[in-house]
Amino acid sequence: MTWGSKRNWFDWVNGAVMVLICIGTIYPFLYILNISLSSPVAANQTGLHLWPEGFRLTAYRGIWEDRHFLRSYVNIVAVTAIGTFLGLLVSACAAYTLSRKRFPFRKSVLGLLTVTIVFNGGLIPYYLVVRQLNLIDTWIPLWLPVMTGVFNIIILKNFFLAVPQELEESAKIDGATDFRVFGTIIVPLSKPVLATVGLWLAVQLWNDWFSPYLFINSPDKVTLPLVLRKYVVENDLTQVGSFARAIAQVTEQPTSTQIVSAVIIVSILPMLVAYPYIQRFFVKGILFGSIKE
């Protein structure tokens, strides 16, 4: 549909539904943002909060002073960055191997991998294996699931199959090895699907609180989702709240709702910044990766 074309009732209904969905999606975020930036008096008022009233940064300054929160933030950035890299590297290598027709038993191996999507060992065997390998209180158990994601391997494999075989054959004639073909031809041509799968892995690692809850014991290794759960679900704002109240004036101490809102905004900010840059790869990456051989 273009602005110059004649519109029917379906276009108007479709447009109205999309507007409602956009409002329902954007307003909760704006509400949380405005509450975190408003004065305590304005934040306690009921009704719509379309913009900050009595602009304050006290809640954010309280978060900044909370070293426990900052440490968990640095930890989750490290876990997400390293885990996404390892997940893409292992998944892409496995997918490239399974996409080559000269690889023996590739269909059998792919079939066995596909079975694990439906049938797997479960949580308790995985925990026992991690404990037996002395990996408790390390970040490795957080990365292992994303490095062995069969769904991502299948998506990558199908995309690699769409790359013309003639490019690989020409490189082989010129003396290129498999590693060189993979690094200089396959990877540069697969940026859309790599960006798409990379964003999936990053979001999975960034939001995962259950795995750190099981495997991380040291306070220095705790990641952001655990701290976020402590603040939002358990409403334990002892540390960050004390910093915020120490910074604020006596009559303008931030409320617990403001502190929780500020924590939520800070925790989702990296994904909000990264998503618009990667979103343009989604259609091409998923479309080619979903085509069956």
Image (cartoon, rainbow, N blue to C red):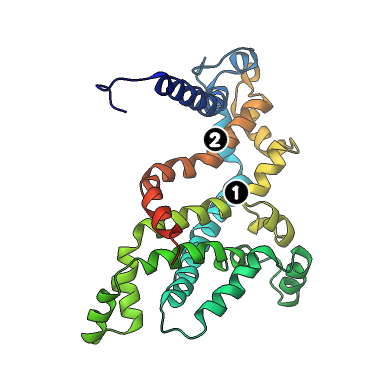
Decide: few, some or many residues near mark 1? Use Cα within 10 Å; few <14, some 14-19, many ≥20. some
Decide: few, some or many residues near mark 2? Use Cα within 10 Å; few <14, some 14-19, many ≥20. some
Tell me the kind of residue under disc 2: Ile
The mark tally for this picture is 2
Relative depth, front residue between 88 and 171: 171
User: What is the number of the mark on residue 265?
Assistant: 2
Query: In the image, is residue 150 above or below residue 68?
Result: below
Residue matched to label 1: 207
Query: In the image, is residue 292 above or below residue 17?
Result: below
Query: In the image, is residue 210 above or below residue 145?
Result: above
Tell me the kind of residue under disc 1: Asn
Relative depth, front residue between 159 and 40: 159
Q: Position of residue 221 (x, y in %)?
A: 64, 59
Residue at 55 percent across and 67 percent down: it is 147
Q: Nearer the viewer, mark 2 or mark 1?
A: 1
Secondary structure at numbered mark 2: helix
Relative depth, front residue between 192 and 201: 192
Task: State left or right for residue 72 relative to residue 154.
Answer: right
**Residues under labels 2 and 1: Cα distance?**
14 Å
